[in-house]
Image: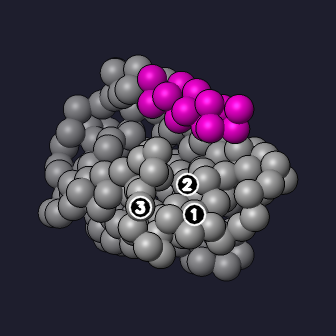
Amino acid sequence: MIAAGLVILWLAWVVVWVAMARGVKSVAERGGGSRAHYPPMAVAVVLLAAPRLPLFPLDVRFVPAELWPAGLGLALTFAGLAFALWARLRLAGNWSSSVTLKSDHELIADGPYRWVRHPIYTGLLVALFGTALAIGEWRGLLAVAIAAVALWRKLRLEDALLSREFGEAYAAYCARTQALIPFVL
């Protein structure tokens, strides 16, 4: 039941995400290395989506095979995907899957962006951690670590591009808003 719930959540999120990609603003400038996060994210997806991965110690459980960790994981997956979706809705036409500046790009600093500069990544990492918790095997935590490194690299590229585009306004935003975890990181 939990596994089916995870599949439904992720598939629904992908369908909505792809549908929302229509109608975004045209690209004004593409940042260097803007798609380098794709391969590690693909590895993370395979680690989480594989029904079984008989590679010791990746197939060993880090939580007991009980309902509470799986249920908590499902709830975290839902919350993370919902947060990412809210951020994506607020970003609207400024969104891109790669590091880009859009035509008439706007600096968004409200909604979930008032708490973190990269709420889509925060939401995705929470959702990935929730999925890893629901699966309960070390491969899930490895997937989260791989995704975190890839997204951290991407957010650094985005921060540099947005800093150059918005100057002091972006510097002030960075000074008051953490990258991924409110008040921490």
Is residue 137 visible to the viewer in this orientation of the structure? Answer: yes
Density class for disc 1 (Cα within 10 Å; few <14, some 14-19, many ≥20) is many
Nearer to us: label 3 or label 2: 3
How far is the residue under mark 3 from the one under mark 2?
20 Å
- Residue at the far right: name it: 68
Please say whether residue 92 is one of the residues in the magenta stretch: no
Label annotation for residue 137: 1
Q: Nearer the viewer, residue 162 or 4?
A: 4
Q: Amino acid at mark 1?
A: Glu
Point out the stretch of residues depicted in magenta.
1-15
Which residue in the structure is indicated by mark 3? 54
Q: CA distance from mark 1 to mark 2?
A: 13 Å
Query: Measuring 45% from the left and 23% from the top, which residue is drawn there?
Result: 15
Identify which residue is drawn at 36% across, 51% down.
46
The image shows residue 107 at horizontal and vertical percentages of 46, 51
Location of the C terminus by quadrant is bottom right
From the image, give the main secondary structure of the stretch colored magenta.
helix
Residue 176 location (% of width, % of height): 63, 72
State which tag comes first along the sequence, 1 or 2.
Answer: 2
Please tell me whether residue 127 is drawn above or below residue 115 in the rendered image. Answer: above
User: For the residue labelled by badge 2, is the local secondary structure a helix, a strand or a loop?
Assistant: helix
Q: Could you tell me if residue 171 is visible in this image?
A: no
Proximity of marks 3 and 1: CB atoms separated by less than 8 Å: no
The answer to whether residue 123 is above or below residue 159 is above
Q: Are marks 3 and 2 in contact (CB under 8 Å)?
A: no
In this view of the protein, which residue sits in the foreground, 42 or 115? 42
**Amino acid at the residue labelled 2:** Leu
Secondary element at tag 1 = loop
Percent position (x, y) of residue 174? 53, 72
Q: First in sequence: mark 3 or mark 2?
A: 3
Task: Identify residue for label 2.
Answer: 128
